[in-house]
Image (cartoon, rainbow, N blue to C red):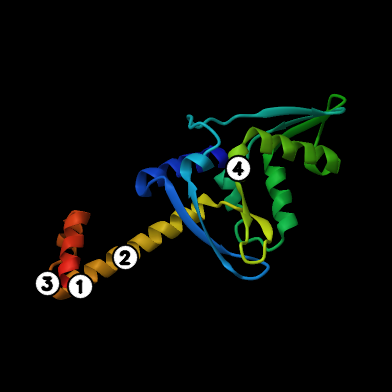
């Protein structure tokens, strides 16, 4: 599954779990003003959900013929923690190149001109538009305009972590007040648990 297809599924999962509305915030890089904004999962999903398949693509650039695939989660896992952005990008591009040929001969990644590699990168972005979602932001305090990338994996993980912490705090409060076991508290419906919390509060 490509990164874009994976993220499209994650947006759907997020919608099922927490709803369509996504509330977020970011600090302005110019004046540090906190900017709060709302997104919708339907607005962020650019591709239709489909069954995962390992697809290969072909692009011709002058005399070159490149066979390539779209990056996936394994490719990203291979560059996690890399402190050299250029080296990481090169590793990612090299992984996506399946094969290259010119004049009937096969060539390796290191033999390709930079402009040919750039054409492959552009083709990958066109084939997988969900791979990079950029949000246009405007600071109301200083009028600075900039873009941030939506990392849906990070976003959902933060929401799940926050939700888990809230539930643990609720369990702690109810167990301390009523002496109930954790399993009994967690087996309650959210509405019933919230009612008991209101009584405690």
Provide the secondary structure element on which disc 2 rests. Answer: helix
- Observer-nearest of 119 and 29: 29
Mark 1 vs 3: CB contact within 8 A: no
Work out whether 196 lies above or below 110. Answer: below
Camera-near label (1 vs 4) is: 1
- CA gap, disc 1 and disc 2: 15 Å
Q: Dot 4: within a 10 Å radius of its alpha carbon, few (fewer than 14), some, or many (20 or more) residues?
A: many
Say whether disc 3 or disc 4 marks the residue closer to the N-terminus.
Answer: 4
Q: Which label number is shown at residue 201?
A: 1
Say whether disc 1 or disc 2 marks the residue closer to the N-terminus.
Answer: 2
Say whether disc 1 or disc 3 marks the residue closer to the N-terminus.
Answer: 3
- CA gap, disc 3 and disc 4: 49 Å
Say whether disc 1 or disc 4 marks the residue closer to the N-terminus.
Answer: 4
Q: Residue at x 38, y 46 (%)?
A: 19
Q: Residue at x 65, y 60 (%)?
A: 82
Work out whether 171 lies above or below 137. Answer: below
């Amino acid at each position: 599954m490509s990164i874009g297809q994976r993220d499209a599924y994650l947006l759907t999962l997020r919608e099922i779990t927490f709803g369509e509305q996504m509330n977020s915030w970011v600090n302005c890089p110019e004046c540090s003003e906190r900017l709060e904004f709302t997104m919708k999962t339907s607005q962020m999903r650019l591709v239709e959900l489909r069954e995962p398949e390992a697809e290969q693509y072909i692009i011709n650039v002058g005399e070159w013929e490149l066979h390539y695939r779209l990056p996936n989660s394994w490719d990203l896992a291979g560059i996690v923690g890399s402190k050299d952005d250029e080296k990481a990008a090169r590793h990612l591009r090299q992984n996506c190149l399946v094969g290259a040929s010119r004049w009937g001969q096969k060539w390796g990644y290191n033999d390709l001109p930079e402009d040919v590699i750039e054409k492959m990168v552009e083709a990958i972005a066109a084939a997988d538009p969900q791979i990079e979602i950029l949000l246009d932001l405007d600071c109301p305090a200083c009028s600075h305009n900039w873009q941030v990338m939506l990392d849906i994996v990070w976003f959902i993980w933060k929401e799940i972590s926050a939700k888990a912490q809230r539930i643990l705090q609720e369990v702690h409060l109810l167990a301390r007040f009523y002496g109930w076991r954790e399993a009994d508290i967690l087996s309650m419906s959210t509405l019933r648990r919230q009612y008991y919390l209101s009584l405690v509060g």
